[in-house]
């Protein structure tokens, strides 16, 4: 059974998520909080398998809470709850290490799939969310990037990172490019080293910030 803590300042959202999760015997909501400050001791005490975290909350928001959890050495995966007008915050969440994003009106199946992926340690990047964020970044004009390293990825590495941003797994990317899955993973390691990151989500976040994924 997956134990879950929900952190959202809207009571209706918390109750709605609980009702959905309770329809599946694999999930149990063991705690909830209306802001990050309230959530931190609850998370420390209950040690859930996954945290569903809102971004915009009073007192302490989602990004600040995730940063504090990271400082504390927490390895509990966080799935961000988001709306359609939080692109910058979503990128910040990816950079910190969020394992996925859920729109607050997401389907039951998508909710379950995201939680299961997060518990397995995978980063599930919703295609519609990532395409929207990339599109928003592509529309920005006149940005200047100080580091030459920002654009040092090869065409193949950029192609792989774009596929990652669309939520594709290494096996699918390998088939699409006609190379082995091991080669894809080797390219990902090179991408991580060039961007100074440790995960797919962080690589996507940094690439978006630097304009590497502008279509």
Image: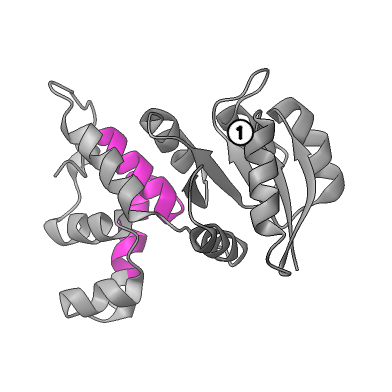
Q: Is residue 215 above or below residue 29?
A: above
The answer to which image quadrant residue 67 occupies is: top right
Spot occupied by residue 137 in the image (x, y as percentages of width and height): 23, 33
Number of labelled discs?
A: 1
Image quarter hosting the N terminus: bottom right
Measuring 42% from the left and 46% from the top, which residue is drawn there? 202
Q: Which residues are magenta?
A: 185-210
Is 109 situated left or right of 2 in this image?
A: left
Could one spot residue 75 in this view of the protein?
no
Spot occupied by residue 127 in the image (x, y as percentages of width and height): 32, 54
Spot occupied by residue 212 in the image (x, y as percentages of width and height): 21, 42
Asked whether residue 207 is drawn in magenta, I would say: yes
Is 193 situated left or right of 16 in this image?
A: left
Q: What coloring was used for the rendering?
A: one colour
Measuring 45% from the left and 58% from the top, which residue is drawn there? 124
Of 69 and 190, the residue lying toward us: 69
Asked whether residue 131 is drawn in magenta, I would say: no
**Would you say the magenta stretch is mainly helix, strand or loop?**
helix
Is 68 situated left or right of 47 in this image?
A: left
Q: Residue furthest right?
A: 45
Measuring 36% from the left and 69% from the top, which residue is drawn there? 169
Image quarter hosting the C terminus: top left
Measuring 55% from the left and 26% from the top, which residue is drawn there? 56
Residue annotated with mark 1: 67
The answer to which image quadrant residue 208 occupies is: top left
Spot occupied by residue 20 in the image (x, y as percentages of width and height): 64, 55
The answer to which image quadrant residue 118 occupies is: bottom right
Could one spot residue 34 in this view of the protein?
yes
Q: Is residue 158 above or below residue 174?
A: above
The residue carrying pointer 1 sits among few (fewer than 14), some (14 to 19) or many (20 or more) residues within 10 Å by Cα, namely some
- Where disc 1 sits, the SS reads helix
């Amino acid at each position: 059974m997956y134990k879950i803590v929900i952190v959202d300042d809207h009571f209706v959202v918390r109750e709605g998520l609980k009702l959905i999760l309770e329809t599946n015997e694999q999930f149990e909501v063991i705690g909830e909080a209306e802001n990050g400050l309230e959530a931190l001791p609850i998370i420390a005490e209950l040690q859930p398998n996954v945290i569903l975290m809102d971004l915009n909350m009073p007192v302490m928001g989602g990004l600040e809470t995730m940063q504090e959890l990271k400082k504390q050495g927490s390895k509990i995966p966080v799935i961000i709850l988001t709306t359609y007008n939080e692109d910058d915050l979503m990128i910040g969440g990816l950079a910190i290490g969020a394992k996925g994003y859920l729109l607050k009106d997401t389907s039951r199946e998508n909710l379950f799939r995201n939680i299961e992926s997060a518990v397995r340690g995978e980063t599930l990047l919703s295609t519609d969310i990532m395409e929207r964020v990339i599109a928003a970044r592509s529309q920005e004009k006149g940005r200047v990037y100080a580091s030459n390293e920002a654009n040092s990825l090869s065409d193949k590495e950029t192609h792989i990172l774009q596929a990652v941003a669309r939520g594709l797994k290494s096996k699918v990317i390998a088939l699409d490019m006609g190379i082995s899955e091991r080669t894809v993973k080797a390219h990902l390691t090179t991408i991580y080293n060039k961007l100074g990151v440790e995960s797919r989500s962080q690589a996507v976040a940094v690439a978006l910030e630097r304009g590497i994924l502008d279509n």
